[in-house]
Image (cartoon, rainbow, N blue to C red):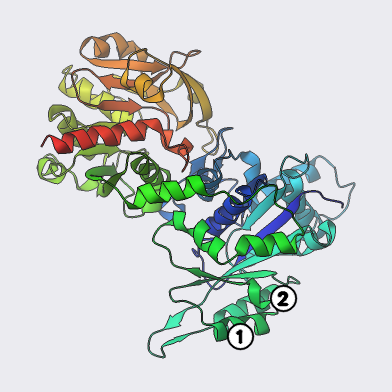
Amino acid sequence: MASKTKYIFITGGVTSSLGKGIIASSLGKLLQSRGLSVTIQKFDPYLNIDPGTLNPYEHGECYVTEDGAETDLDLGHYERFLNVETSQSNNITTGRIYNSVITKERKGEFLGKTVQVIPHITDEIKSNFYKLGQDGKYDVVITEIGGCVGDIESLPFIEAVRQARWDLGPGNFLVVHLTLIPYLKAAKELKTKPTQHSVKQLLEAGIQPDILVCRTEYPLPEDVKRKLALFCNVQLDSVIEAMDAESIYDVPLLMKKEKLDERVLSKLNLKPKSKLDLKDWKGFLGRLKNPTSVVTIGLIGKYVSLPDAYKSIIESFIHASAAIECKVNLVLLSSEEITADNYVSMLKPLDGILVAPGFGERGFEGKIATVKYARENQIPYFGICLGMQVAVIEFARNVLGLTRANSTEMSPNTPHPVIDLMDEQKKIDQMGGTMRLGSYACDLKKGSRTALAYGKTKIQERHRHRYEFNNAYLEQIESSGLVATGKNPKTGLVEIVELKDHPWFVGVQFHPEYKSTVLKPQPLFVEFIQAALHKNKNK
């Protein structure tokens, strides 16, 4: 097939969690900074249709796109680095591939043929490889293949990559293999053998990597690079050193120093459309690394033992802190460990408190105690999704005197369901992909904190929830000081609540963290940090 779009495939070997998503994002950023239009997609080898039903402890955060796709957290990195929205088409799982093929088989689309992994599954994979490049919108499509080379789950994807080389033709196809060069302290040596074996597995699958990106804790000497080039059959200047970085946002500059983008452009016969421009990126890093002030903010959640469960929130703090040159010491606290007896001592050191999204009743009462402390002690408070709902429940209990107020998620028989299941959710009996997902409009009350933060009164933000503010209690709650300052214009769904006579107390039903990027920090995070900074200075 003739292709104007260039396709880059990124595979991984030796071990998982090497950072394929960060390398893909960094390469994409470098190419984008040369005037090329770039998108990145992730192919995950698990059988789930999407990660929406996966435990955050197992898979980390579930990232939601503008069009409502529940996706891998790496798509968050793609958006944060490129400042370009992703979609349902940017994250494909084995489950989606097989579901599509089996659906076609049931409809009789294969004309009675025996349906097999090759060609039917691999053809379906390849059609998804090429989908984003078909309309000519992108100069480059980068595809990250999840898992490790050699994993049984990844075999159909690797075979599809092999076939893609022949479909696309010379100059349109490139494989970047990310691998690990471990350092043995006892021998005081960097060892190349794991990488040799990883490349050997790729070769056995019919794929010769064009570029090796080598994760390492120590610089790679020239003799090690020569050895890798010789035994892995790649050019010497295509062995790229990827040293551990202080921040993921340093990686594009490190890859530029190693000339990764130049090797890719050369091998794809691709001419940049402009000179490399990383001025804004370097400016962001300069502000990030040279703060003029410091605040301590607590992130209260139930999955804090795995920070990746809150990846977008953590990254949003980084983007916003750089914008105002303020270092945020982010303290992750388990809501399960916060009790009525210890919440004061645990929360007192904090300049600001964020209660994170989540599901289920575990740790719920710890969040209630947290909101109570923030409300009563004038501590800047930011509640996201469940964090907004908890704020409403705490207010109903401790200000309105509705002591048994709750969400029907936590207590189906509560006499005061100030948070209730959305009407559209009551007939749903399947969990996967059935929440209120994706971007929805929100009208902001003029003069509210959120309207001032956004600088406008009409916004679009992404959602992921089943439960909502119960408008039957709206008048009672507002009359006591917790005001609905943001609503969906079509349904009247309360999207934002703000507490009167408080320095900064905001709860949002949506997920503002999903739209924060390096070059466009989310305004609510910026305002929240500034409120915490003001609190810190007035201690």
For marks 2 and 1, the one nearer the N-term is 2
Alpha carbons under labels 2 and 1: distance apart: 17 Å
User: As shown in the figure, which amino acid type bears the numbered disc 2?
Assistant: Leu
Q: Give the residue pinned by disc 1.
A: 227
Q: Is residue 231 above or below residue 462?
A: below
State the residue lying farthest toward the bottom: 187
Establish if 433 lies above or below 501. Answer: below
Q: Nearer the viewer, residue 323 or 425?
A: 323
Quarter containing the C terminus: top left
User: Would you name the residue on which mark 2 appears?
Assistant: 203
User: Is 57 placed left or right of 32 in the picture?
Assistant: left
Quarter assignment of residue 7: bottom right
Q: Is residue 158 left or right of residue 87?
A: right
The structure residue drawn at horizontal position 29% and vertical position 48%, both measured from the top left corner, is 291
Give the percent coordinates (x, y) of residue 409: 36, 31
Is the Cβ of the residue at disc 2 closer than 8 Å to that at disc 1? no
The amino acid type, in three-letter code, at marker 1 is Lys
The reply, left or right, for residue 494 in relation to residue 415 is right
Q: Which numbered circle lies on residue 504?
A: none
SS of the residue at dot 1?
A: helix
Residue 338: percent from left, percent from top? 18, 44
Q: Can you tell which of label 2 and label 1 is closer to the viewer? A: 1
Q: Nearer the viewer, residue 535 or 114?
A: 535
